[in-house]
Amino acid sequence: MSRIGKQPIKIPTGVTVTVDANNIVVTGPKGSLEQFLIPGINFEQVDDVLNVTRVDEEATTRANHGLIRSLVNNMVIGVTKGFERKLEINGVGYKVANTNTGLKMNLGFSHDVNYKLPEGVSATIEGNIISIKGISKQIVGQAAAEIRSLKKPEPYKGKGIKYVEERIIRKSGKSGKEK
């Protein structure tokens, strides 16, 4: 049995979980999220606990058991607390500003880079830190990855966009001496 899949999902007060034939809908104080169901996986709700079980022992069903449990658990966390990723901009003259549709960034190119935020995601800027927030872990992570890919950090001076918790391993310059 899947170690992750057999763990029950605790449903906090104020959150409703609705399971129908094709999808599962989780609604909470921050919003509503929907996920399609994978065949062979069943949900049983007892009071404030949601259990995920599988119908058979086929390889694909076993593989999807833990996956769908993690997705639904992330949905429950998202509609109650939300998710956040923080990015840091390093570099001389690198700037970021909020616009009404997304972010406008000066990343050392000859032009400004405009990034349109996906629906359901917001961004706040404090100095050189960008905070991406939303209720869907997948969409928040994807938006943060797309922003980071606009100017990845380089290993010599560390210039670029990186996650706050990310550590850039520095290389020595051309002469080979350590600084």
Image: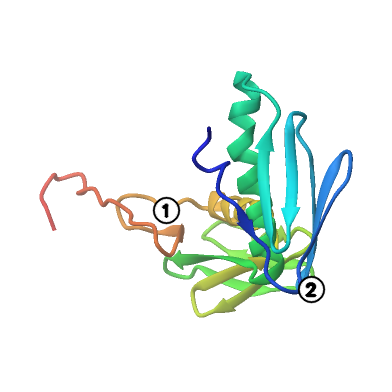
- Which residue is drawn at the image coordinates 49% and 40% (left, top)? 3
Secondary structure type for disc 2:
loop
Q: Which amino acid, by three-letter code, is at mark 1?
A: Pro
Closer to us: 79 or 141:
79
Left or right for 60, reference 18: left
Which residue lies most toward the bottom here?
Answer: 126
Q: Is residue 122 visible?
A: no
Secondary structure type for disc 1:
loop
Q: Which mark is residue 153?
A: 1
Left or right for 169, reference 133: left
Q: Which mark is residue 100?
A: 2
- Which residue is drawn at the image coordinates 60% and 54% (left, top)? 141
Give the quarter of the figure containing the C terminus.
bottom left
Closer to us: 44 or 34:
44
Residue 77 placement (x, y as % from top left): 64, 63
**Alpha-carbon span between mark 1 and mark 2:** 27 Å
Residue 144 placement (x, y as % from top left): 59, 57
- Which residue is drawn at the image coordinates 59% and 29% (left, top)? 63
Sooner in the amino-acid sequence: mark 1 or mark 2: 2
Closer to us: 43 or 174:
43
Report if the CB atoms under discs 1 and 2 are less than 8 Å apart.
no
Which residue lies most toward the right here?
Answer: 21
Closer to us: 59 or 162:
59
Which residue lies most toward the front here?
Answer: 46
- Which residue is drawn at the image coordinates 31% and 57% (left, top)? 157
Left or right for 10, reference 153: right
Q: Which amino acid, by three-letter code, is at mark 2?
A: Asn
Residue 54 vertical position relative to residue 23 in the rendered view, above or below: above
Q: Quadrant of residue 125?
A: bottom right
